Image (cartoon, helix red, strand yellow):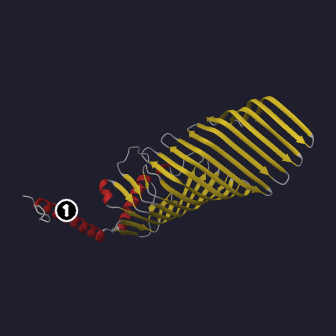
Amino acid sequence: MRRAFGAATPMPWRRILIGVAALLLLLVALGVFFLATFDANSQKVRLATMVKEKTGRVLSIPADVRLKLFPVIRFELDRAILDEKNSSIPFATIEAVKLSLRLWPLLRRQVILDQVEIGNFSVALQRFANGATNFDDLIAKDESPSSLRFDLAGLTIKNGTLRFDDELAQRKTQFTQLQITTGRLTENVATPVQAKFLLTNDNPVAVLNTELSGELKFDLQKKQYQFTRTKLSAVGAATGLKPITIGLRASIDADLGVGRVALQDLSAIVDGRAGTQTVHAELASPRLTSAPNNLSIEQIAAQLKIDDLVRKISVSATVPALVSVSNKIDASDFKLDFSIEQDKLRSSGALSAALTFDPAQQRVAFEKMTLNSKMQRDQLVVEASAMGSLMLN
């Protein structure tokens, strides 16, 4: 006999539903008890002790840590300081952190955070003359994969400062007024990234207001990172040019596991002014690949134009392929075209050769060189050509 619509639920299912409801009530009660008894500030000493044991650094959190559990777990702190290893000099400081953690994914060994906000942070990086850095001890050395998954709904950084003192290269670089916003950050999912910062550098001298955007995709276990649709624009002063504007587009593919970085569809444009002189430069390449002790570039096309009140100079160069091994650069088919205009004098020419550049020896060699030039002034025309080899030290 069929059960009529609306009849009572069978007894086994009713007991299951009652059991589930009781379990939910128990979890809620435990959450309320945890909220009433948990003291986030009591964990500061434990965290500082763990950091000291693992890194030899001192972590200070002078302000209170605020914790909320509903509707999500939310942490807030106003100040944290991480010192240099075995030193009282600050390595990193953060003035404000807000993050929310979803509770249920933790049961599946997933760390899923809602929007994380970081404000007024400062990090001082340093590379010493021997090549060592002040953050070597912070780089994870455990290569075993982790089953804990990383998932962040979004990241916001406001007013950050990153300093890099490179004693080996005798250069100091700063990123100040740093602003970063991202979409969802999780492995193997592309997310939009936008950043703004003021870049200052002392060797060469540069002060640039910079904007950067693109899509980031990463795999932490494989140490693979992709930054596609990359757009960079900068305005300021650099290398004697004021003002100067820089535009760059590329797709970046980095495999840090093998030390390889590839740039695809690279396009860069620079415009600047030095007094009455204007400078325009362009560079394009479909692919540039850098690996340990190796660099290869496909089909380089470059152009330089200099224009002032008395002369116009235009130089363009093309290289079908360029290879660098152990810092030595070889371009078997280097071609360069040039033109110069000054008053009534016009000069143009073309050069082709096999180019070799050795930075360690400060030597440039042009093998199998062919040079053709033409100079014209009023009705006078002079043409010349040369073949041979040329070496510059």
Q: Position of residue 56 (x, y in %)?
A: 45, 54
The residue at 52%/49% (across/down) is 227
Q: Residue furthest left?
A: 1
Query: Which is more toward the observer, 27 or 80?
Result: 27
From this viewpoint, is residue 85 visible? no
From this viewpoint, is residue 110 visible? yes
Along the horizontal axis of the image, is 330 left or right of 5? Answer: right
Count of marks placed on residues = 1
Q: Position of residue 20 (x, y in %)?
A: 19, 62
Q: Dividing the image into 4 quarters, which one contains the N terminus?
A: bottom left
Along the horizontal axis of the image, is 158 left or right of 15? Answer: right
Q: Residue furthest bottom?
A: 36
Along the horizontal axis of the image, is 26 left or right of 188? Answer: left
| Other residues around mark 1 within 10 Å, as few (<14) / some (14–19) / many (≥20) | few
Q: Residue furthest right?
A: 379
Judge whether 41 appears above or below 351 on screen: below
Query: Which is more toward the observer, 348 or 113?
Result: 348
Q: Position of residue 49 (x, y in %)?
A: 39, 58
Judge whether 77 appears above or below 86 on screen: below
Judge whether 49 appears above or below 346 on screen: below
In the rendered structure, which amino acid carries the disc numbered 1? Answer: Val
Q: Position of residue 387 (x, y in %)?
A: 80, 28
User: Element at badge 1?
Assistant: helix
Q: Quadrant of residue 358?
A: top right
Along the horizontal axis of the image, is 220 left or right of 198? Answer: left
Q: Dividing the image into 4 quarters, which one contains the C terminus?
A: top right
Q: What residue did someone put label 1 on?
A: 20
The residue at 52%/44% (across/down) is 254
